[in-house]
Image (cartoon, rainbow, N blue to C red):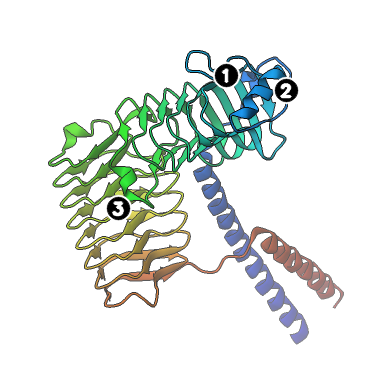
Amino acid sequence: MKSNRKTQIIILIILGINFALSTFFINNLRFIAKERDITSNYKDDFDHDFLKISGVSEKIHIDGNSAWAAFKSAGNCTGNGTYSEPYVIEDLVIDGGGSGRCIWIENSDVFFKVENCSVYNSYYGISLQYVKNAHLQNINCSSHTFDGISLFYSNSNTISGNTATDIDGYGILLSHSSDNKISDNILYSSIRLDGVNNNVSGNVMKKCGLQIYSGNTVNYYSQNIDTTNLVNGKPLYYYTNEIDLGSNNFTNAGQVILASCRSSFIEDLNLSCGETGITLINCNNNTIKRNTVNNNRNDGIYIFGGDNNTISENTVYYNNNNGFFLEYCDYNLFLENNVSYNTLHGYSCYRLENSIISGNNINHNKEYGINFIYCINNKITGNSLIENEKCFNEDLLSEGNLYENNECVNRAPTISGYNLLLLLSIISLVTIILSKKLKKT
């Protein structure tokens, strides 16, 4: 009799564990599904219908001005490489075969056009390196692992009227490239600028936006970016060296970029599903309040440099990197923001000093709630940090930071879906065996 009772108790315990783990597994699946929903905001299904009817062409690689003559003699282009008669590559469909570049042109300063082409299924659609005087127009770029159209050390080129879809990197990438014109493109992956004096206008960015490379802050001061650029149908606002900007300067904004602006107010905007919702570079005495900054491909709010800014009551959810990314900031206030469900950290801080993070809800971020690297003399008080991998992380170079009255509950370790299924199967099998043994006894 005692043996039967022990067996019954064991079975009940196993069934209880089984039920608890089943509930956990369901919740885990919900979390995974939620993450997939986030990434799905940045992808649109690739439609091959736009591809031209002509046969698929070979990849193209042209290296140097002299290579154009051989390319032309093979019947692959027309023109003479002059301003009035540029070389023209047109009406091609190029399947990249899953790697490399569909069209790769380098070390060229003759005049040429690539137009009315479709390039897809490669690492890069069209790549220019050390190139001047190119004109890329009416090109469909799709299904590329890295970038659709990329320029490296290439100046004085025009990229207009193109479409970029289903691209993992950037729709248009400029690296160390200046004095280029980017206009009237339709993009489902962002534009990234690294260089100066680029003219950006009339671009339609859907579920993406514009990023300026922050490794050299000079890039932020010399671009020509106007409000004809649309982020999810709303204007992109780019200002440098302005004072006292207000609501009239950000009407129905889709994205905001400020460099060396002060005493301005950014309030009550929805800056979601772009690249980075709000960017401040060396800006002082500004107020960012009650904005919704969700589901961006990069960070929700990025602040580099600048003092005495007040950032409060913003909702910063589901951004693909950090909720806030802060660098070289002093004497800033971060008050009562909701910063949750971001893919990396709630607050990611490098050299943040003498600032206050208070009264924030910093919950369910995938990694740390607050991550400090070389951060000094900050006050972190009265925040809720629930279900982050870790509430706080502080490196050895950080010092003098004061933590008071914060609610901290780290996320419990998770079991991967496959391992959990295996565990549940084993528990179920053991339960059946014990049940049969009980019947026999």
According to the picture, the residue beneath numbered tag 1 turns out to be: 87
**Residue 303 disc label:** 3
Q: CA distance from mark 2 to mark 1?
A: 21 Å
Q: Specify whether 338 is left or right of 429.
A: left
Q: CA distance from mark 1 to mark 3?
A: 44 Å
Q: Quadrant location of residue 6?
A: bottom right
Q: In which quadrant of the rendered image does the N terminus lie?
A: bottom right
Image point (76%, 69%), residue name: 431
Q: Position of residue 412 (x, y in %)?
A: 51, 69
Q: Secondary structure at mark 1?
A: strand
Within-10-Å neighbours for mark 2: few <14, some 14–19, many 20+: some
> Which circle's residue, 1 or 3, is located before the other in the chain?
1
Q: Which three-letter amino acid code belongs to the residue tagged 2?
A: Val
Within-10-Å neighbours for mark 3: few <14, some 14–19, many 20+: many
Image point (45%, 31%), residue name: 206
Q: Position of residue 95 (x, y in %)?
A: 70, 29
Pointer 3 with pointer 2, Cβ within 8 A:
no
Image point (68%, 78%), residue name: 9
Q: Position of residue 87 (x, y in %)?
A: 57, 19
According to the picture, the residue beneath numbered tag 2 turns out to be: 56
Image point (72%, 23%), residue name: 57
Q: Nearer the viewer, residue 388 or 351?
A: 351
Q: Specify whether 175 is left or right of 114.
A: left
Nearest to viewer (mark 3 / mark 2): 2
Q: Which three-letter amino acid code belongs to the residue tagged 1?
A: Tyr
> Which circle's residue, 3 or 2, is located before the other in the chain?
2
Q: In which quadrant of the rendered image does the C terminus lie?
A: bottom right
Q: Specify whether 253 is left or right of 192.
A: left
Q: Which three-letter amino acid code belongs to the residue tagged 3?
A: Ile
